[in-house]
Image (cartoon, rainbow, N blue to C red):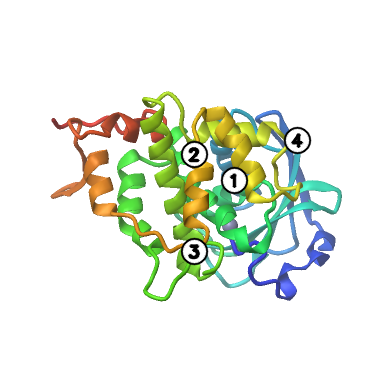
Amino acid sequence: MLRGLAPGAWAQPPFTRIPVASSHELKIGGATIQVDFAPGTLDLGDDAELRHVRTAAEAVTVYYGHFPVARARVLIDPVADRAGVLQGTSWGDMGGWPAFTRMRIGEHTTQADLNDDWMMTHELVHTAFPSLPDDEHWMEEGLSTYIEPLARVMIGDLTAQRVWHDMMRDMHQGEPRASDEGLNQTHTWGRTYWGGAMFCLVADVNIRRETHNRKGLRDALRAIVNAGGTIDHNWDLERALEIGERATGTHVLTRQYAEWKDKAVTVDLDKLWSELGVRAGPEGIEFVNSAPLARIREAIAGGQGIGSRE
Ligand SMILES: [Zn+2]
């Protein structure tokens, strides 16, 4: 979160030199993840935090096929007298690590807080895309916002109902407001996180439409990682998208980028949810199997959330 957006004192390298009270090593998805704890107290203890890092790293591994960088360091920084996962920030190529993530976690954080936390996975998804120029920062945040719940649903850490419920609730925040310009010009919170996520959702759906659901955004993203497009490399977005779309055999990504970067593009989200077969029912989200893009909806969530209703 907030990567590169507001480089205040907290965003500077010195925390790579924060003293370490304990250090652990996790092996996940072909990567070594070193989890360090800064001095301080956490009610839950190290093991619960380590399980939380492991779950997030496993979700990212399942989405990408392997963990995106060979070595990553996660610094858990306890915050006294607070509860909850407070802040996450990630950097590429820092202190000798391809990826470095700092998580500020409240002393009184509960297991329920960790179960509900999206930030850890969001941060580790950042390792799986190159670092972009400031104007294209929305793609880094949009991708993490869009991929985090999909990666988690694929390992059973979230239900498909919850994923689509949250998308229906939140995605509209990415729509351009009256004076907004394209994603490369308007850098508000809504356009950066949810405008970027909406770009990803629309691209995912359109790649799947054009390939009869044989390819999706995930194929493009895996190809970008496999070509070396990870957080420790500085690329421009066009370079990443060209690699991504070769993997899909479509021109969805570069075409959509050309359209969205300089122009405020609105999306008829109500129509999209209806075509995907997602609707709010009396007992929460219902999936409609007969909807025209129902198979695409299932594929986006890795086959989770098969509709029960025709
Ligand atoms: Zn972020």
User: As displayed, is residue 5 above or below residue 54?
Assistant: below
The residue identified by callout 4 is 70
- Asked if disc 1 and disc 2 are in contact, CB closer than 8 Å, the reply is yes
Which quadrant of the structure image shows residue 221?
Answer: top right
- Asked if disc 4 and disc 2 are in contact, CB closer than 8 Å, the reply is no
Left or right: residue 22 compared with residue 206:
right
Write down which quadrant ligand 1 falls in.
Answer: bottom right
Kind of residue at badge 4: Ala
Kind of residue at badge 3: Gly
- Residue 20 coordinates in the image, percent (x, y): 80, 57
Q: What secondary structure is marked by label 4?
A: loop
Kind of residue at badge 1: Val
- Residue count near mark 2 (Cα–Cα under 10 Å), binned few <14, some 14–19, many ≥20: many
Residue 278 seen from this side: no
Along the line of sight, which residue is nearer the eye, 68 or 292?
A: 292
Mark 4 vs mark 2, CA separation in Å = 19 Å
Does mark 2's beta carbon lie closer than 8 Å to ligand 1?
no
